Amino acid sequence: MEIFLTLLFKIIPLYIIIFLGFIAGKYLNVSKESIANVLIYTIVPVVVFNGIVNTKITPGTLSIPLLFFLLACITSLLTYHFSGYIWKDSTRNILSFMGGSSNTGYFGLPVAIAMFGEKAVGIVALAIIGGSLYNNTFGYFLAAKGNYSTKESLIKVVKLPILYAFFLGLIVNIAGFHLGTIFLDTANNFNGAFTIMGMMLIGIGLGDMKKYEFDLKFIAFALAITYLLWPILMLLIIFIDQHTFRIYDPNLYKMLLLLSMLPVAANLVSYSTILKIHPEKTALVVTISTLFALLYIPLMAVYFLK
C-alpha cells in the first residue's frame, strides 16, 4: 500500500500539468503546432544529445537503446498487421506508430525515480534514446506513409534533427570531450522543459479539439497494445535473458518491466499534428492512457515491482 500511495502522489503533478495545458489550449489560443515544432526540432535533440554525452558507453548500456528500439519496431509491426483487419486508411498508420511508442521521458522518468531513486536516471535516459530513435525513424516513417509516398516519408525522416544529435553525442562521448558546467546547467533546463512542455501538449491538444472523436475500437486497440502486449513482450525478453545470455543484472529487470508499462507517448500528439493524421483521436487516446496509468502503474508496482 505504501508503494501504491508513494507512486500515486508522484504521478499526480503530471496530471496538473496536463490540465494547465488544457486551459492554455482552450482559453489562451496556444498553438499546438508551434509547441510541437519547438519540442521536436529544438528541445528533444538537446535532451538526446545530453543523454548520450553523459552516459557511460559500454556494450551493455548500448544494448538498452537497441532493446527498446527493436521492441518498439516489433510492437509497431504487430499493430500494423492486426489493425489492418479493421482499418484500411491512415488510421492504421497512426495506430501502428502509437503501438511502438511509450511515454518514457515525460512520464517514465519521474515514476522511475520515485520507485528506484536517482540511479534510475541513466537507464531511463538510454531507454528514451531507443524510443526516440524509433519515434524519429521507423515509427515516423510508418505514420507518414499514411499520407505521403515512400520518398516523401524518407525525406521527412532525414530532416529530423534527433538523428544528428544522437550521432554527434556519441562522437563527443567516445572522444572524451568535456563540455563544461555551463552546458550541463543549460541542458538540465532543457530536460525540465522536455517534461513540462510534453505533458502540456497533451492538454493543449485536448483544449484545441473542435470535436471529440470517441472511437471506442481505436481506443481499446491502443490500450491493449500499450498495457498488455508491451508488458508481455518485456516479460518474455526477461525470461529469455534469465535463462540464456544474462546480459542484464537481475536488479535491472524490475526497471525494464516498469518501462514497459507506460502510457502512450505524449509527443505522439506532436507527430500526428505535424503529419495531419487524426490529431484529435491521438490526443484523446494519449489522455485516456495517461489517466489509466494513474492507477495501473501503482497497482502493477504492488504486485510485480516490490
Image (cartoon, rainbow, N blue to C red):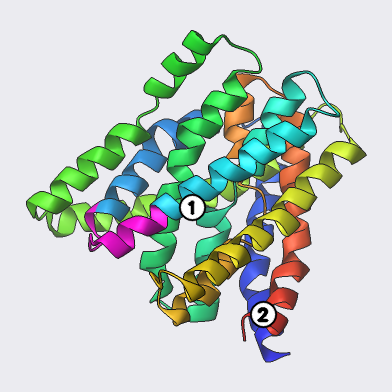
Q: What is the three-letter code of the residue carrying label 1?
A: Phe
Residue at 75% in and 53% down? 289
Residue at 46% in and 33% down? 136
Is residue 220 in view? yes
Q: Which residue is at the front of the view, 270 or 35?
A: 270
Q: Are marks 1 and 2 in contact (CB under 8 Å)?
A: no
Question: Measured from the top left, where is residue 91 in percent x and y?
Answer: 76, 25
The stretch of residues the image draws in magenta is 53-65
Q: Is residue 158 left or right of residue 18?
A: left
Let me know if residue 58 is in the magenta part.
yes
Element on which disc 1 rests: helix
Q: Residue furthest bottom?
A: 2
- Residue occupied by mark 2: 304
Q: What is the three-letter code of the residue carrying label 2?
A: Phe
Other residues around mark 2 within 10 Å, as few (<14) / some (14–19) / many (≥20): few
Q: Quadrant of the N terminus?
A: bottom right
Residue at 66% in and 18% down? 146
Element on which disc 2 rests: helix
Other residues around mark 1 within 10 Å, as few (<14) / some (14–19) / many (≥20): many
Question: Measured from the top left, where is residue 274 in percent x and y?
Answer: 58, 23
Question: Measured from the top left, where is residue 174 in percent x and y?
Answer: 13, 52
- Main SS, magenta region, reads helix
Q: Which residue is at the front of the view, 26 or 255?
A: 255
Q: Quadrant of the C terminus?
A: bottom right
Q: Quadrant of residue 93?
A: top right
Let me know if residue 151 is in the magenta part.
no
Q: Is residue 67 left or right of residue 145?
A: left
Label located before the other in sequence (1 or 2): 1
Q: How many marks?
A: 2
Q: Residue 51 bears which disc, if any?
A: none
- Residue occupied by mark 1: 68
Q: Quadrant of residue 132?
A: top left
